[in-house]
Amino acid sequence: MDKNLKISLLAEFYGNNLTKKQNEIVNKYYDQNQSLKEIAEEFGVTRQAISDLLRRAVNTLNKLETNFKLLERYMLAKDLVESLIQKVQDEKIEKNQLITSIKQILDTIVP
């Protein structure tokens, strides 16, 4: 997975654990593709200050993911659902297999 996409998704899951400023800057940098210079000018600080703030925010997001694994479980469940949809569309699945697959997906989401 692309680093920028990963950070954007982590911010979706854990953004409430960042400060308002960290969350805003992560959004501007990773979702809106603004440069460090543009963000620094907007906030009236140095490019280095924004870089440091982003680094701390990303470290926080990564630590939260290490502890809770919400993104990992989400991606696994997403892959399982896509696989199940394909099997249903191809009519290569029986009712009992469908039920078992659905239970597996639910167990992945809520262990």
Image (spheres, rainbow, N blue to C red):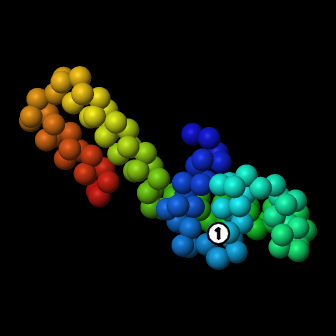
Q: Indicate left or right for 54 with 18 as reference.
A: right
Tell me if residue 57 can be seen: yes
Instruction: Identify the residue at horizontal 47%, vertical 53% (top origin).
Output: 71
Q: Is residue 58 above or below residue 5?
A: below
Q: Position of residue 23 (x, y in %)?
A: 64, 69
Instruction: Identify the residue at horizontal 61%, vertical 54% (top origin).
Output: 7
Q: Indicate left or right for 9 with 106 as reference.
A: right
Q: Indicate left or right for 24 with 67 as reference.
A: right
Residue, disc 1: 23
Q: Which quadrant is home to the C terminus? A: bottom left
Farthest-out residue, bottom: 20
* Quadrant housing residue 84: top left
* Quadrant housing residue 38: bottom right
How many marks on residues? 1
Tell me if residue 64 can be seen: no
Q: Which quadrant is home to the N terminus? A: top right
Residue type at tag 1: Asn
